Amino acid sequence: MSYTKLPKEAKDEMIQRIQTFHYEQTGDEIGDLGAENWLDFFLKEIGPFLYNQGIEDSKQVLMDKMLLMEDDLYALKRPIDRR
């Protein structure tokens, strides 16, 4: 499964953040290649879980909006005189 290609600026920022995190946690520096390998791993292995959760979250927001719309449409109904 492939993942979305990231804009260079975003990828560079993520690599920098991985390097900073790694240094803060271990006191050791990690190079660009090492950080990029970690980024690729996370995108490949963990990315799909985050993506799927985003889909589920979006689905829930949409369902909530649909319920509100249904209520609004029901409120617009006019009574029918059944004499």
Image (spheres, rainbow, N blue to C red):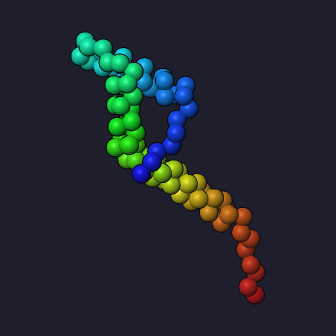
Residue 13 screen position, x and y as percent: 48, 23
Residue 26: image quadrant is top left
Evaluate whether residue 53 shows in this view. no
Q: Residue furthest left?
A: 26
Q: Furthest residue to the top? A: 27
Q: Is residue 72 left or right of residue 54?
A: right
> Is residue 7 in sight in this rendering?
yes
Q: Nearer the viewer, residue 49 or 6?
A: 6
Viewer-nearest residue: 33 or 27: 33
> Where residue 4 sits: x, y (%)?
51, 43
Q: State the residue at coordinates (34%, 37%).
A: 41
User: Residue 5 at what x, y percent from top left?
Assistant: 52, 39
Q: Residue furthest front?
A: 33
Query: Which residue appears at 74% of the width and 78% of the height?
Result: 80
Q: Is residue 60 left or right of residue 21?
A: right
Seen at 76% across and 81% down, the residue is: 81
Q: Is residue 77 left or right of residue 35?
A: right
Q: Of 49 and 78, which appears nearest the observer?
A: 49
Snapshot quadrant of residue 38: top left
| x 40%, y 47%: residue | 48
Q: Above or below — where is 71 with respect to 3?
A: below
Question: Tag count in the figure?
Answer: 0
Q: Please tell me in which quadrant of the rendered image residue 69 appears.
A: bottom right
Q: Position of residue 12 (x, y in %)?
A: 49, 24
Quadrant in the picture for the C terminus: bottom right
